[in-house]
Image (cartoon, grey):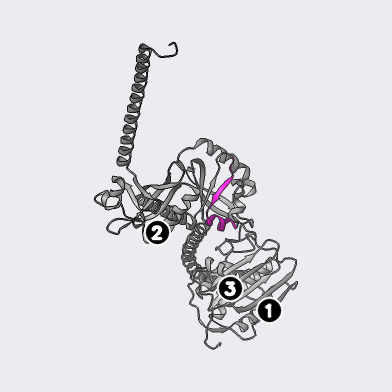
Amino acid sequence: MSDQLTQEDLIEQMLSTSKSLGRQIGLRKAESKALYESRETLLQIFESSPDAITVSDIAGIITDCNAATVKLHGYKSKEELVGQSGFMLIAPKDRLRAVETLKDMLERGPAKNMEFTCLKKDGAEFEVEFSASIIRNADGEPTSFVIISKDITERKKYVETLRRNEEELRLLIENTKDSIFWADPETGAIINCNKSAEKLLGMAKEELIGRHVSILYPPENKERVSAGFLKYAARHSGAEIQPDVETQIVTKSGRIIPAHVSSSMITISGKPAIQGILRDITEIKEEQLEKEALINQLNHSQKMEAVGLLAGGMAHDFKNIISVIDGYAQLALMNMKQDDVNRENVDRILKSVERAQRLTLRLLTFARDERANIEPASISGIIAELADMARGGIPKNIAIETKLPESDLCVLADANLLLQALLNICFNAAEAMPDGGRLTISASAAPHDGELAKRQPGFDQEHSILIQISDSGHGIPDGIKDKIFEPLFTTKDRDKGSGLGLSVSLGIVKSHNGAIDISSKAGEGTSVNIYLPATDRECQ
């Protein structure tokens, strides 16, 4: 029968089927081997992972874990953990959050980089970062959680230390007295500054950021500063620091402040920046000026002392010589007849002797070689007598006005010497008003003057009386204001002044432990302020 298989065909078909089955069995064996090897690889990865890997069921019961998990939590073997609730490894304060996280995963999927506080077997707490995923069956139903944990305790400590260091550095920068600016080296725009900078300039940080650094400087310096900034940025790199440069800074109100500026190239967030540190040196400058003033006062005092010694010695010699001239002139005059043609010449000699004696008296007073009769004296009485004496020697086109205090004030003084000192000042004021004017003499308790305290260190203003002599004259030019009390200094012609009047006045006032201060502007008159120690004793 043609449709029936022959024996040979049957045998061939059986052989073919046998070969096919053999191939299938070989493939299955290969697949089984591959699966086995894959499973072994995964197990090796699971066990050798440095990160702790924990597998739990949906209820959170641990079904498996690797050696790193055992070590991380301080156990001896995984058997101590398998079958236990995974939540027991979480610190009580974080357990509820851990439960909520696993619940959320069922709806939202894997969780990554979550931080929790965990427990060791002995109860010690430590910080971990974990990521978790869900294992599902063929029907898509969740069956297990796989949690990978990493101990981040040391990292957290490092981060906290870094944060604390950054905070300390920030506080240091913010609270330092120096003003610090950071600027873009390409554009020159300010990118940040500290609080001291805001305080120094009187501007908020928001007003400064984005503006060119040249706004820190006076308008006349802006162009030079801008050019210098670009040159500095192009020439410097790394942390090279420009030495302190003394310059001027302008505030929002327009006030000019002397400052030291040092600059350096730094890196902020990976980008180069120029850091400028400004130090306000106003106080240093003032101290330098005060020091210079003290040095000048010392030099002047030493100069005056030397001149005084010289003047005293010369005055004594002149006094002796003049006494001899006066004596012989008096004898000559006594022996002359009234109609003697030489009598007029001798009279002229005696008048010259009288002038020489007055000059000698001034020299002795300047040299403080004459003893002062110090006693309580009435300021009102002194000024009244001064005004009368001044009216007799001052041109009539100068009006003299006096302003006396309501209640009389007393000073410790030699009234005659003090009158001489004040009269010299009045005469000097009158000479500043050749076309007439007004001379005002007033007295009052000395007000506090901070500037005077700087110019007259150690002088007690609180227990002093102020006598002020003011004129409406042409004033004193700035160039000679500091010289007018120097001995022999004068602006008059040689035959019209000796240059001793004001120096004698200063010597008398200082011999009374007082001080003289001048306020004057060219064309606006002059006020001479004489400060003298007050006394509670009754005036004479």
Q: Which residue is mark 3?
A: 530
Q: Is residue 340 visible?
A: no
Mark 1 vs 2, N-terminal side: 2
Which image quarter: residue 397? Answer: bottom right
Residue at the spot 42% in from the left edge and 59% down from the top edge: 96
Apparent side of residue 43 relative to residue 507 in the rendered image (left or right): left
Q: Which residue is mark 1?
A: 402
Mark 1 vs 3, N-terminal side: 1
Which image quarter: residue 437? Answer: bottom right
Percent position (x, y) of residue 31?
Answer: 35, 29
Residue nearest the viewer, comparing 199 with 536:
199
Please report the bounds of the magenta region as a residue range.
187-203
Q: Is label 1 or label 2 in front?
A: 2
**For residue 95, which numbered disc appears in the image?**
2
Q: Does the stretch in magenta take in 189?
A: yes
Mark 1 residue crowding within 10 angstroms, few (<14) / some (14–19) / many (20+): some
- In whole angstroms, how far apart are the C-alphas of marks 1 and 3? 15 Å
Query: Across the whole image, how many numbered discs are drawn on residues?
Result: 3
**Compared with residue 103, is residue 429 higher up or lower down, i.e. above or below?**
below
